[in-house]
Image (cartoon, rainbow, N blue to C red):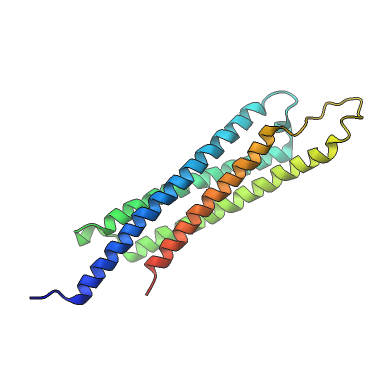
Amino acid sequence: MSQNPDITSSSSTLRAIGQKFRLIGWISFWIQLVLGVVSTVILLLFAISSQRPGSAGNNAGAGFGIFLAICGLVALGVGIYLAFRYTRLGAQLLSANPNNRPRKSETVQVLRLGVIVNLLGILLTLLGAQAIVGTLAARAITQTQIFFSPQGNQPFISGLDMFVVQANTNTVMAHFGGLIASLWLLNRITKP
């Protein structure tokens, strides 16, 4: 007896999708994890250094920006988990036992959740970046007055301040990588 060609092509398509889920999931996982760890370390250093008296971290705008940046990192943590979940879905799709395979609707739901989480993370991080950059711009404008001011107690923009902007950029890039992975996989799984 020969095998039904529809079953053979369906299993090869399922195998290809499972392999793509594993590969793209791992790529997305590592990109998000590395960028997220770097951003977290930089923000923690900023939080520690901002506790000094007279530091720039006492500014309300910077504080709200850091809060939003941390919210973006929390969303990135969820995105990292979802990227790892993609690898597990890929392994389930490659399973020889059809009962272990997830339904298409469940897989699409996880991918859509990944898109929403990464878009929300990008939004939060960009709002945080706007607050931080606005605070830095205001400080940069007022820095020229420091040299002629009798008080001279306003802080300069430090390298650590610029690292916070870099941390936000890294977080946005990590979310963007997760978003691209989710959209690409969603496109592959919903192809007719």
Percent of width and height locating residue 19: 31, 58
User: How many marks can you see?
Assistant: 0
Q: Is residue 70 left or right of residue 130?
A: left
Percent of width and height locating residue 152: 86, 26
Percent of width and height locating residue 113: 45, 57
**Residue 49 found in image quarter:** top right
- Residue extending farthest to the left is 1
Q: Is residue 82 visible?
A: no
- Residue extending farthest to the top is 53
**Residue 51 found in image quarter:** top right
Q: Is residue 92 visible?
A: yes
27 or 115, nearer to the observer: 27
Q: Is residue 25 left or right of residue 177?
A: left
27 or 80, nearer to the observer: 27
Q: Is residue 51 left or right of residue 8?
A: right
**Residue 98 found in image quarter:** bottom left
22 or 130, nearer to the observer: 22
Residue at image point 42% right, 64% down: 186
Percent of width and height locating residue 95: 23, 57
Q: Quadrant of the N terminus?
A: bottom left
Seen in the picture, residue 191 relative to 60 is either above or below; the reply is below
Q: Quadrant of the C terminus?
A: bottom left
Residue at image point 50% right, 38% down: 37
Residue at image point 58% right, 52% down: 122
Residue at image point 39% right, 72% down: 191
Seen in the picture, residue 56 relative to 25 is either above or below; the reply is above
Seen in the picture, residue 87 relative to 161 is either above or below; the reply is below
